[in-house]
Image (cartoon, rainbow, N blue to C red):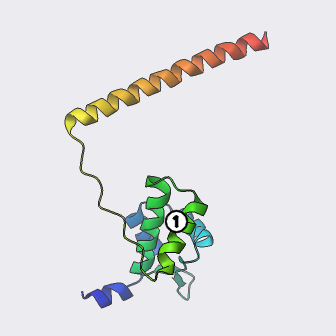
């Protein structure tokens, strides 16, 4: 398929959810928050997204989930990119899989954090019981 044909292809919300790995309600909410995200609707009311809108969705997801932006911050960042007339840069490829030693170290840190949280919960429960007495 040529690039022009690919750009004109329309995708249903279910397909976009699989690509972006988000739930449909998330996409519907983002439509209310991001004016640049306005899919067409079919006669039956089905949302139909273009490739450009999918790129916007992937960029929004990256800003919110990976880069830690708030909705307002992501909206401003996206607006500045869109004002320049450029399409948002698609999300970069996923990071390479970590080396086994690095993965083991990360798992160890996670286990340690989980243990610290569990210990803190126990202490807080004990304090709560003391206060109830």
The answer to whether residue 105 is left or right of residue 16 is: left
- In this view, the residue farthest toward the right is 133
Question: Circle 1 sits on which residue?
Answer: 24
In the figure, is residue 5 to the left or right of 123? left
**Is residue 52 at least partly visible in the picture?**
yes
Residue at image position (29%, 30%) is 105
Q: Quadrant of residue 50?
A: bottom left
Q: Is residue 132 above or below residue 92?
A: above
Quarter of the picture holding the C terminus: top right
Give percent across and percent down for residue 47.
Answer: 52, 79
Looking at the rendered image, the quarter that the N terminus falls into is: bottom left
Indicate the position of residue 18 as horizontal and vertical percent values: 40, 64
- Residue at 24% from the left image edge and 47% from the top image edge: 97
In this rendering, the count of numbered labels is 1
Give the left or right position of residue 72, taking residue 22 as reference.
right
Choose top left, top right, bottom left or bottom right for residue 70: bottom right
- Residue 37: horizontal and vertical position, in percent? 53, 76
Is residue 114 toward the left or the right of residue 106 in the image? right
Residue at coordinates 46% horizontally, 22% vertically from top-left?
Answer: 115
Which residue is depicted at the point 42% across and 78% down? 87
Image coordinates for residue 51, horizontal then vertical, percent = 39, 79
Q: Is residue 82 above or below residue 8?
A: above
Nearer to me, 49 or 93? 93
Q: Is residue 133 above or below residue 51?
A: above
Q: In the rendered image, is residue 22 in sight?
A: no
| 10 Å crowding of disc 1: few (<14), some (14-19), many (20+) | some
Q: Secondary structure at mark 1?
A: helix
């Amino acid at each position: 398929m040529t690039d022009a044909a690919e750009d004109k292809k329309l995708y249903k919300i279910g397909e976009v959810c699989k690509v972006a790995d988000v739930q449909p309600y998330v996409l519907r909410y983002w439509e209310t928050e991001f004016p640049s995200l306005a899919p067409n609707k079919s006669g039956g009311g089905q949302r139909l997204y273009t490739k450009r809108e999918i790129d916007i969705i992937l960029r929004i997801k990256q800003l919110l989930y990976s880069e830690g932006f708030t909705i307002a911050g992501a909206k401003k960042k996206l607006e500045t990119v869109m004002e320049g007339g450029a399409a948002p840069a698609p999300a970069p490829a996923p990071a390479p899989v970590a080396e086994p030693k690095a993965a083991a170290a990360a798992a160890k840190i996670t286990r340690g954090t989980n243990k610290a949280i569990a210990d803190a919960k126990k202490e807080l429960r004990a304090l709560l019981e003391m206060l109830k007495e």
